Image (cartoon, helix red, strand yellow):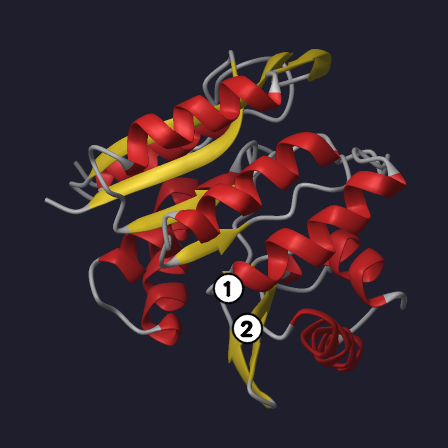
Amino acid sequence: MKKILSIAGSDCSGGAGIQADLKTITAHKMYGMTVITALTAQNTTGVYGIMDATPECVAKQLDCIFTDIIPDAVKIGMVSNSEIIAVISKKLIEYKARNIVIDPVMISTSGSKLLSETAETVLIRDILPLASIVTPNIPEAEFLSGITISDERDMQKAASLIYEKIGVPILIKGGHLVNDATDLLFENGICYWYRAVRVNTKNTHGTGCTLSSAIACNLADGNTINESIQNAKNYLTGALNFGLDLGLGNGPINHMYAL
């Protein structure tokens, strides 16, 4: 059985973070493990509190996993301060982690920055270059590239600029653009487009976590980056199309729709 590690924050309402990751990993019939970087108090209507884990606790969690059940892939989500980022970087290098998928959780749905400038610097310098693929959404890609993205040409330019900065494949998720659900993979100077019809639903809580975890599962299974992205998008589309409707706000998707 393939083993997948999620390094991320906890979502008590179950729609995002490590809860979404574990459901996604289970739906792919793989073994899920977690390193919890923060506890959040949140639900479908918003985030109401965050308590970071200590860097020492994060380091011990990573040691326990990599010295016992060695992951075939690693997904990284919410890492909230520079000390935790530095610890994760050190341990991933120490244990020669592979198939690393990073969903750079940097900007909230409302547009607020979630990281300090110091944490942003350490994330870009120490963590992102370790990835097999980085999966920013439009606002995160705008921040990482320094340009405004309003169409596919801008996506391509932004991906090129980010690639120059960190040197690993970039998947810009186009869900924030209004026309369709088109994503762009930029790898070694080549653009690959993934086009899909937008699912008409407000219940999209945790979609970024889910997609990155599904990509990690596919990489662990020996698929190429291209194949992994396409399979992950197909899985996410199915989970959205199920039409789950829970909560008072932007509800979660049905990770288990195919089981």
Q: Nearer the viewer, residue 138 or 77?
A: 77
Q: Residue furthest bottom?
A: 189
Q: Residue 50 occupies which quadrant of the picture?
A: top right
Can you say whether 180 is above or below 95 in the image? below
Question: Which residue is identified by label 2?
Answer: 169
Residue in the picture at 69% in, 64% down: 179
Identity, as a three-letter code, of the amino acid under mark 2: Pro
Q: Quadrant of the C terminus?
A: top left
Q: Nearer the viewer, residue 226 or 114?
A: 114
Q: Quadrant of the N terminus?
A: top left
73 displayed left or right of 30: right
Sequence order check: which comes first, mark 1 or mark 2?
Answer: 1
Residue in the picture at 37% in, 41% down: 239
Do residues under tags 1 and 2 come within 8 Å of each other at their CB atoms? yes
28 displayed left or right of 250: left
17 displayed left or right of 179: left
Q: Nearer the viewer, residue 27 or 90?
A: 90
Residue in the picture at 75% in, 60% down: 141
Q: CA distance from mark 1 to mark 2?
A: 5 Å
Can you say whether 15 is above or below 148 in the image? above
Any part of residue 22 in sight: yes
Residue in the picture at 74% in, 42% down: 106
190 displayed left or right of 146: left
Identity, as a three-letter code, of the amino acid under mark 1: Ile
Assign a secondary structure to mark 2.
loop
Label of residue 133 in the image: 1
Can you say whether 27 is above or below 15 in the image? below
How many neighbours does mark 2 have within 10 angstroms: few (below 14), some (14-19), or many (20 or more)? many
